[in-house]
Amino acid sequence: MVKRAAEMVAEANAAVGTLTVEQAKQLVGQDDVVFVDVREGAELAAKGKIPGAVHASRSHLEFYADPSAPAHKPELGSGKRLVVYCGSGGRSALAAKTLKDMGIDKVANLLGGFTAWQQAGGEIER
């Protein structure tokens, strides 16, 4: 059976859960929440990020999340709730599912990603 990207994103969102921009805005700055930006570095440099977000590009996410890997980012294994986002919500859905598959249970995808965040007037850090 062949799966399309849209089907995989929908399945990932169902597995990890989602947050609207308004829900996510309430979590910014909370001690028990880490925003994870999985966009590529050029995207982040050009547009900024959600304040305090940790950058962990989708292309290297598994290595950042694995505590035994040299590139491990401790924020991903902190036990805090992770809110994952990308440009529009597709890559981050898949990334959130990957994190869940790696044993990180408290993870959610930001619906609409950074684009939705910007359109809703969310604060941006440069």
Image (tube, rainbow, N blue to C red):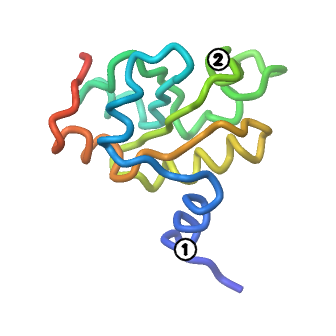
At which x and y percent is residue 125?
26, 17
At which x and y percent is residue 107?
61, 39
Q: Relative to 74, is 37 above or below?
A: below
At which x and y percent is residue 28?
38, 23
In this rendering, position of residue 103 left or right of residue 8: right
Residue for badge 2: 73
Which residue sits at x=22%, y=32%? Answer: 122
Which residue sits at x=22%, y=25%? Answer: 123
Q: Relative to 113, is 12 above or below?
A: below
In this rendering, position of residue 85 left or right of residue 118: right
Count neighbours of disc 2 (C-alpha within 10 A) and say few if under 14, some if 14 to 19, many if 20 or more.
some
Which circle's residue, 2 or 1, is located before the other in the chain? 1
Q: Quadrant of the C terminus?
A: top left
Q: How far apart are marks 2 and 1 (CA)?
A: 29 Å
Q: Relative to 53, is 105 above or below?
A: below
Residue that protrudes farthest toward the bottom in the picture: 1
Residue for badge 1: 7
Judge by depth and name the residue closer to the eye, 84 or 72. Answer: 84
Kindly identify the amino acid type of the residue bearing the numbered disc 2.
Lys
Kindly identify the amino acid type of the residue bearing the numbered disc 1.
Glu
In this rendering, position of residue 81 left or right of residue 26: right
- The quarter of the picture where residue 59 lies is top right
Q: In which quarter of the image is the N terminus?
A: bottom right
